[in-house]
Amino acid sequence: MKFRKFGKLDWQVSALGFGTMRLPTIGGDHSKVDEPEAIRMIRYAIDHGVNYIDTAYPYHGGNGEIVVGKALAEGYREKVRLATKMPTWIVNSKEDMDRIFNEQLKRLQTDYVDFYLLHSLDRNRWEKMKSLNVFDWAEKVISEDRIKYLGFSFHDDFETFKDIVDGYDKWVLCQIQYNYENEDVQAGTRGLKYAASKGLAVVIMEPLLGGALANPPPPVKKIWDEAGKNPVEMALLWLWNKPEVSVVLSGMSTMEQVKQNIEFASKSGIGILTEEDFKLIARVHAKYRELRPIPCTKCGYCMPCPNGVDIPRNIEIYNNSVAYNDVRASRMHYIFLPPERRASSCIGCRTCEEKCPQKIRISEWMRRIHSELKSDL
């Protein structure tokens, strides 16, 4: 494992961090984690040098933190630094902060967390957190040694990101969505460089754009194959090439992915990509832009839909119809969805759009998806 500087801290973080939003599950139910396998994967990663574990209150329907707590028993807690997050969208008072944080400590079977992040900040949530005097609460808990350092994860535009970075002088880390497809999306490259210039550690999420970069459609796969390159390895190396990146989180679902990513991390380094590598990634970037009309990362923040629509699945089916140029197959997938989960059940309430980190106009896309995929329904 290679290790990297972590902002202002006198500590080296593993190049690869274990993100626990996509642990292996049972029966296709996201809330039912395959605990033995998940624990085996997390411990294998730690045994092979991973020292940053990331989780959050809502992951796997609230069960993610519980599984992480079990994985970090038997001496593993002392081998890592643990990050979890405050669910800002359901916090409305300091009493909520206390209640939720205490619940998280219990789930995680620990007396403290190393990094506590305000989860998924955007402009509105940032203003809300300030109005609730979240920093007074956080500094009190820090003084009790139950939180070591404070940070935030982010989904909005660069100007909002800059305001948040500048809005509190004791931030230690930030977590941003970033990959070679998202240089100009959300915080983007400007945000990466700005946070690093302020001494913040920068934690990368969605390095593979919700898996889209790991499983390329045929036109993109052809580019990688002709170059003899692995798309996952290149996406990760592109991030590790940057000195401002502290750690790259991977939401790994299989042991194979864990082993593969550890191998890739062992090859990581700043400035290791060649000019030819950058030209290749530029070609891939251009092709993806042609193929994927809806910038969904399948994070699931839009769920549950009040009317039962499976929003990520509908978008995935539609994007695949375009990327794979196979409308017939996508129509079949759409038909096989239960009627209440189809895009046609969207009533345009826009509740999902308030939660979407990508600011997708979901209700408009639902109408279009149904129109193009309904076939003979």
Image: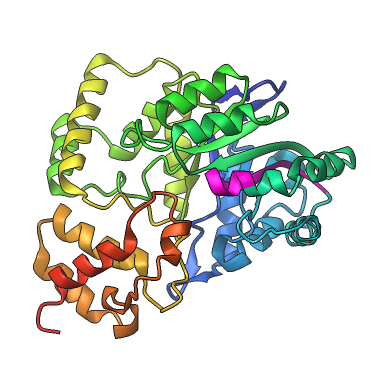
The location of residue 82, given as percent across then percent down, is: 69, 44
Looking at the image, which is closer to me, 204 or 253?
204
Image side of residue 127 versus residue 224, left or right: right
| Residues shaded magenta | 112-127
What residue is rendered at 15% in x and 43% in y?
290
What residue is rendered at 55% in x and 53% in y?
20
Image side of residue 249 versus residue 364, left or right: right
Quarter of the picture containing the C terminus is bottom left
Find the residue positioned furthest to the right.
Answer: 144
Image side of residue 164 versus residue 302, left or right: right
Quarter of the picture containing the N terminus is top right
Looking at the image, which is closer to me, 198 or 243?
198
The location of residue 292, given as percent across then percent down, is: 21, 49
The answer to whether 189 is drawn above or below residue 81 in the figure is above
The answer to whether 313 is drawn above or below residue 148 in the figure is below
The location of residue 73, given as percent across then percent down, is: 75, 54
Q: Can residue 264 be seen?
A: yes
Looking at the image, which is closer to me, 174 or 23?
174
Q: Can residue 122 be seen?
A: no
Q: Quadrant of residue 321?
A: bottom left
